[in-house]
């Protein structure tokens, strides 16, 4: 179990400093050297919520599709998006499965060399602020002075900031507790936190297994778009691998939405949760995989500006100044 800690401006900037150091260290490898030494294996990082990547992993799709290119696949699981991108930037990974829209902002602020490969269309109801059913907290405005648990730099972090602002509050009006989803669930059920901000499938599991009440989700507040990324040196060296990945993600997204029960049956034993929970969670995700184009990155700028206003980023950021992979299709 990961110990929780208070995420102050100092710790936020410390996280950025660590990312920046990794960016500097990894920048020395050239694309050609990278291609010669490591591109025979693509190292993919993912989270429990990385549904489409988990589908491809479970079905062995990428292993089959990449074999003709002489490329093997290795898989690496992470608890949330920020440590995943830290590993990507440290050259411990080549490709990141989908992370919430907030995570690349922190990485970009630290100078990480990442390429946006694909985007999932918005899924605003797939993350929410929940309280216990018997809580006196009836609305976001009631969170003033309360202890709220969530994962740092995750999509729920921006959801909370945006929801507080809509309610006339600021981040300083709450007591933040930065927790992994597993630790957040435990703290929530013990009453150690007053509210929990979480995403699917953890949200669906809490709704199915505990007595909870949603006081806000992302609808009209935070779009919750998810991004697939690659180390830029890998993107430059092996666009053929990224093309295969993009095509298979697109297919997997369509299959999950068109075959919800079959998808739930596939994912339930992998995630260790009931198929009904998986189906509920998948119903709130769009899984519509599309190319990343500048006009679809406008919310990234709003996210960056919100974090800067809360002094969680050291400088203003041009969130659109990022390399974009262009699939052939």
Image (cartoon, helix red, strand yellow):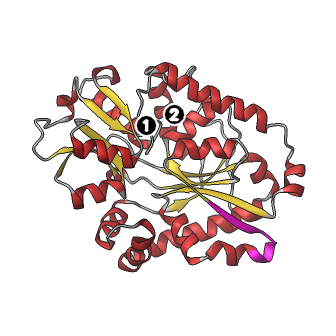
Q: Is residue 226 left or right of residue 109?
A: left
Drawn side of residue 224 relative to residue 78, left or right: left
Circles 1, 2 touching at the beta carbon (< 8 Å): no
Rendered residue at 49%/68% (across/down): 253
Label 2 secondary element = helix
Question: On the image, numbered disc 2 is attached to which residue?
Answer: 301
Left or right, 185 with reference to 254: left
Which residue is more in the foreground, 120 or 21? 21
Give the class, few, some or many, for how many residues have Cα within 10 Å of label 2's Cα (few <14, many ≥20).
Answer: some
The residue carrying pointer 1 sits among few (fewer than 14), some (14 to 19) or many (20 or more) residues within 10 Å by Cα, namely: few
Cα gap from disc 1 to disc 2, whole angstroms = 31 Å
Q: Can you say which quadrant of the picture contains the C terminus?
A: bottom right
Q: Determine the residue positioned at 29% across, 71% down.
A: 276
Quarter residue 164 falls in: top left
156 is higher (above) or lower (below) than 251: above
Please state the horizontal and vertical placement of residue 78, each as a whole percent of the image. Answer: 54, 51
Q: Which mark is residue 3?
A: 1
Q: Give the vertical position of 218 relative to 25 (above or below).
A: below
Q: Is residue 154 visible?
A: yes
Q: Tell me the magenta residue range.
A: 67-75
Q: Residue at x 40, y 26 (%)?
A: 6
The quadrant the N terminus occupies is top left
Choose the circle earlier in sequence order: 1 or 2. Answer: 1
- Is residue 31 positioned above or below 250 on the image? above
Q: Nearer the viewer, residue 304 or 143?
A: 143
| Residue at 32% across, 70% down | 274
Percent position of residue 81, x then y:
52, 46
Residue 3 position within the rendered picture, expressed as x and y whole percent measured from the top left: 43, 37
- State whether residue 218 appears in this view: no
Towards the viewer: 5 or 151: 5
Between 244 and 96, the residue placed more toward the observer is: 96
């Amino acid at each position: 179990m990961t110990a929780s800690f208070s995420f102050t401006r100092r710790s936020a900037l410390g996280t950025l400093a660590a990312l920046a150091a990794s960016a500097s260290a990894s920048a020395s490898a050239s694309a050609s050297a990278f291609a010669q030494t490591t591109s025979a294996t693509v190292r993919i990082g993912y989270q429990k919520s990385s549904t489409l990547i988990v589908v491809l992993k479970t079905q062995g799709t990428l292993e089959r599709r990449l074999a003709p290119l002489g490329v093997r696949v290795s898989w690496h699981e992470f608890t949330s998006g920020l440590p995943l991108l830290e590993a990507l930037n440290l050259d411990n990974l080549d490709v990141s499965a989908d992370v919430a829209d907030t995570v690349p902002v922190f990485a970009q602020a630290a100078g990480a060399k990442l390429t946006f490969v694909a985007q999932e269309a918005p899924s605003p109801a797939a993350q929410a602020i929940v309280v216990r059913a018997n809580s006196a907290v009836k609305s976001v405005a009631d969170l003033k002075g309360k202890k709220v648990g969530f994962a740092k730099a995750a999509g729920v972090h921006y959801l909370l900031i945006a929801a507080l602002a809509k309610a006339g509050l600021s981040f300083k009006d709450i007591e933040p507790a930065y927790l992994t989803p597993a630790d957040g669930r435990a703290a929530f059920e013990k009453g150690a936190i007053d509210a929990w901000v979480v995403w699917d499938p953890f949200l669906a599991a809490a709704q199915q297994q505990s007595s909870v009440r949603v006081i806000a989700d992302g609808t009209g507040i935070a779009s919750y778009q998810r991004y697939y990324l690659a180390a830029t040196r890998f993107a430059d060296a092996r666009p053929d691998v990224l093309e295969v990945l993009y095509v298979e993600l697109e297919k997997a997204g369509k299959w999950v939405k068109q075959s919800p029960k079959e998808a739930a049956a596939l994912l339930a034993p992998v995630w260790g949760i009931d198929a009904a929970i998986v189906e509920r969670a998948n119903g709130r995700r769009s899984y519509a995989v599309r190319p990343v184009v500048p006009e679809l990155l406008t919310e990234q700028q709003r996210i960056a500006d919100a974090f800067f206003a809360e002094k969680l980023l050291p400088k203003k950021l041009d969130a659109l100044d990022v390399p974009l992979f262009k699939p052939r299709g």
